[in-house]
Image (cartoon, coloured by chain):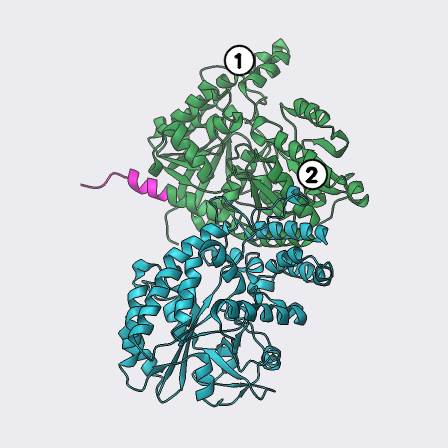
Amino acid sequence: MSQKPLKVLMFGWEFPPHNSGGLGTACLGLTRALCDSSRGIDLTFVLPKKQETVNMETSFVFADSYPVSMKVRVVDSILSPYLNTESYKDYYHLLSSGDKSFYGNTLFDEVEQYARRAGAIAEEEVFDVIHAHDWLAFGAGIHAKEVSGKPLVVQVHATEFDRTGGNGVHGHVFEIERRGMAAADKVISVSSLTKNIIKEKYGIADEKIEVVHNGNDMRIRSCDGTKAVSSLQILKDKGKDVVLFVGRITLQKGLEYFLYAARTVLEYRPNTVFVVAGSGDMAEQMMRLTAQLGISKSVLFTGFLRGKELDEVYDIADLFIMPSVSEPFGLTALEAIDRDTPVILSNQSGVAEVVKNALRVDFWDSDAMADKIISVLSHPSLAGELEKNARRELPHISWASAADKCSLIYRTLVAQSIPTMK
Amino acid sequence: MSSICLYLHVHQPRRIKRYRVFDIGRDRDYFGDSSDSDVNNARVFEKVARKSYLPTNALLLELLNEYPDFKVSFSITGIFLDQAEEYSPETIESFKKLVDTGRVEILAETYHHSLAFLYSQKEFEEQIRLHADKINEHFGVAPEVFRNTEFIYNNDIARAAERMGYKGVLTEGADHILGERSPNFVYRPVGTENISLLLKNYKLSDDIAFRFSQREWSEYPLTADKFGSWVNNVNGSGEIVNLFMDYETFGEHQWEDTGIFEFLRALPSAIYRHPDNNFVTPSEAIGRYTPREELDIPDYISWADVERDLSAWLHNDMQQDAIKSLYEIEDDVKLSGNEELLSDWRRLTTSDHFYYMCTKWWNDGDVHKYFSPYESPYEAFIAFMNVLHDVKLRI
């Protein structure tokens, strides 16, 4: 291809190995595919703070090296993209008074600082198009656009409505999201499900939104080919069936429906163990619910797992469940499939739009979920076909095709933004 | 001269409703969905009767009255007739009127549109007898020519049909069994003496059944005159043109607005434009034309898909698991002496249940090929296995 290299300035918030969830994984997968030399894209990825990153061909810029008028010394941020403003306050109060001076008073101050530094970065960097991931980086994207006049793409990995399950939507977060989408020249959503939310809740025009589904990239995870040696292996050795949940324990992820289904499954198949891999603000509440349901001895809470540990539980599991109330995409489902584990997906998930060889349920229908769990555990032929056929789909759900779509969006915007010669 | 044998296959399965693991031991009404879904058998039957059976039979009766030589033949499954009795008695009446003309032949087949031949010779023969009784009860005729479910065929099936006294078998004129030979002759199955083989001319049959309304087809739109001229081209290089297809081609697969009924109305006169042409039933064809040569077909063929094999029903592990589990309990079900139980078990032998579990199109992303009332092949499997579990508890 003789296309002129296109320069992209991309704003994110987290990046592997220092990611706390799917946002970082998605940013890595997408940027790595975009930087494939055949696409002719030069990409600069901006992060709010200095960190080590996985080795790749992208140049990184760390916003904390840019002084801003706010005169805040920046140290490692306490933020994660999944922190809400309430939990930020909790963390903030725990800090010593000395540390406090390094942070913004609120999550919003942190976001605002990032945005201002983005303006400075945009003045120095040379680029054709801006791409910002999720609300924490939207302000940065807008500032960069104001300074440079270049087209802005914002990508929505999750909305405030997903994170809160619709209850207690934070007005200020909503406003930052809305402003980012309004200021953008194009909005990328990770699923049709999310596109609908963007249209209905944020009032963005249909034609301004493009769906670009996430992909799967085996190289992201430590994959050394060795089988599980985890302590959970003892469960399999004892002949237990293992049903797995992976995700943050928040309202959005629907763990309670998984637990209700578990109670029913255990009536039919008492030899089943339910593993909950994740942590979150509802962890205690969910442990209490497990006790109330009388199933504590059959439910294991492992805490947050990553890398090899996570791979091991995928390997051990006979079945993976994603019971999310509202899941813009759901990368963990692809990870499970990649580890040859059959999946049951919430109909309220973006990944269910691209994986055909899965069982589906409405998240609230715990009976349907239990019925399908029992069926998969009872019939190896069903589990085997789900596993085999889903695996065959994976190569078609790739970051390469996501990058192709982004690349087309960039080039179209850049072509439109060049003034025509009179 | 060319004889045209128009044969239509008439069938509706009893689809299993959404049947959860919690229903096992509590609910025996496996086929009685009453929601507005596509597993509601009454709803489906009434819809297809309105769109296809009633208007098509009315038209066929008109053609039989108008053209003294016009003939048509059917295979009508037992479970179709059962459902017609329940949901649309006027559909049975309309078929009776056609048979009463004396120019409509009804063929033999398994009552439940089953794959029994592949798993139980005994059940295969029992279902054929049950079917013959049902046909006799409704139409007062005894079938003389056999067609197996989905045109599944090999040498053994021809021998079994010959043993049961049938004088002919219908199957697919698949390229890989014909080689250089033409489907437009009558053949003799290898190792038989008194039975003839009629082979579907799939090109001409599929022109009507599949391509009729395809706008991207170079021959679109297909007129009766054009089709009649293609049939005429066979003159001199064949004796019989077997147009075998699903009955629902008329009004359901090809909707009324495609012009399919106008096509059918104009077809006889287009065929008769060549004075040597005539219509025959399978029995007449077998009586009139001597088998051209022996055909040796050791491996199973069918009329399904491009593959023309058994893979639509028996390809994946779920299909194998389900059908083996079903036939495993055949003897126990029969020994129980419980007629209701046997009737439910037989309804599970219908090939459609296994077809709904097929994953091969699902994998290719060619979902439009997947004709199924279920959300996925997996849901079809779950409903079937849960019902089978309940059946086992009743033994």
Amino acid on which disc 1 is placed? Asn
The answer for which chain carries disc 2 is: A
Please give the range of residues in magenta.
Answer: A411-422
Residue A120 at x, y percent in the picture: 42, 25
| Mark seen at residue A105 | 1
Task: Specify the quadrant of the image occupied by residue A186.
Answer: top left
The magenta stretch spans residue A376: no
Point out the tag, 1 or 2, that comes first from the N-terminus: 1
Q: Nearer the viewer, mark 1 or mark 2?
A: 2
Residue B4 at x, y percent in the picture: 38, 80
Q: Residue at the spot x=42%, y=63% of the render?
A: B93
Residue B307 at x, y percent in the picture: 52, 69
Amino acid on which disc 2 is placed? Val
Query: Where does the C terminus of chain A fall, quadrant-wise?
Result: top left
The answer for which chain carries disc 1 is: A
Q: Is residue B56 above or below residue A285?
A: below
Q: Could you say whether the residue bearing mark 1 is in a helix, strand or loop?
A: loop
Q: Could you say whether the residue bearing mark 2 is in a helix, strand or loop?
A: helix
Are marks 1 and 2 in one subunit?
Answer: yes
**Chain identity for the colour green used in the image:** A
Q: How many marks?
A: 2
From the viewer's perspective, is A131 left or right of B336? left
Task: Specify the quadrant of the image occupied by residue A115.
Answer: top left
From the viewer's perspective, is B171 left or right of B275? right
Q: What residue is disc 2 on?
A: A265
**Chain identity for the colour cyan used in the image:** B
Q: Residue at the spot x=39%, y=76% of the render?
A: B103
